[in-house]
Image: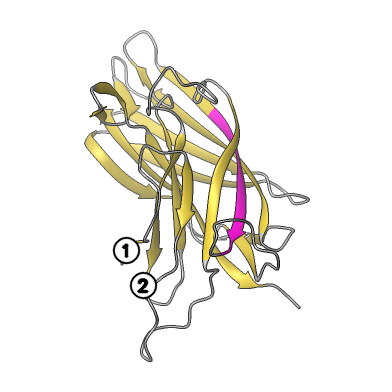
Amino acid sequence: MLTTLSVAVAALGGTALGLPNPTATDDTPVRILPQFWEFNITSLSGPGCPDFGLTDRGPFVTRPTFGLNTVDGSEIYYWHFAYPSLRTSIEPGTPSASIWCETTLSYAELDSNMVPVAKPGYHLKLHKNGTAMLASYELDDGVEAKWTFTYFPEGKREVVDTIIIDGPRSGNSYRDISPVNGLVQWPLPNCGLGTIRYRTQLTLTAKKDGARGSVSSEKVEYKDQAGWYGVQQGVSYDWEQCSS
């Protein structure tokens, strides 16, 4: 089961801030996590995220959105990041299409004043579970949508997750998670802060003549502006205590 974390960030804002969980009781699992933490997008590149630093698109830009965590003792955390421009389509005469974005995030453990802690207590560990993707699909029979998530751990080999969706599929807000067989997890090099870099690629392929397909997100309105909400990638993580 997943439950939403308490968050102090609007879905159309720009910073993801994790807040402490309610006080544990005797029958709840022991949780290993900092009091506060945050993620910020510090760099974007690629045709799937051409909006870094832009202000003329209103709120419909690449941004952090929301967090989730399990409550069954497995301690799987996710933070999601929306990509309004990461969408593509195919039609007769155009049997394949691809689009990508490379994202760099900063992570920091915070104190009660919402500034980086003077003495960090936790290492962030990436890839606690598979990568999640929330998206809208219109796929004919014979169309394959493939998500490829490539993580670049510092000083380590690339880690690749994939999600493959075979048509027919139609509808908004599907949430899929990549398979977790052979899951590789790694801590950030430094205690309490660090950088996360990954590449997200969407590829559509028609395996039948004349098949059509599109992957996008919901159209929404915000303060009299209309735009794409953005497909949302969920990055999974948990923590371990720093060695003294």
Q: Nearer the viewer, residue 227 or 165?
A: 227
Direction bottom: furthest residue: 26
Where does the image place residue 20, in percent across and percent down from the top left?
Answer: 44, 68
Instruction: Give the alpha-carbon distance from disc 1 to disc 2, as whole Å.
Output: 7 Å
The answer to which of 81 and 113 lies nearer the viewer is 113
Residues rendered magenta in the picture: 101-111
Residue 52 vs 1, above or below: the answer is above
What residue is rendered at 32% in x and 22% in y? 208
Answer with the quarter of the image where residue 205 lies: top left
Can residue 184 be seen from the camera position used here? no
Please tell me which residue is depicted at 54% across the width and 49% down the height of the picture: 39
Q: Amino acid at mark 2?
A: Val
Q: Amino acid at mark 1?
A: Thr
Give the image's coloring scheme: secondary structure
Q: Which residue is mark 1?
A: 3
Q: Quadrant of residue 206?
A: top left
Count how many numbered circles sit on residues in the image.
2
Q: What residue did someone put label 2 on?
A: 71
Q: Quadrant of residue 232?
A: top left
Q: Is residue 220 above or below residue 115?
A: above
Q: Was residue 110 drawn as part of the magenta stretch in this picture?
A: yes
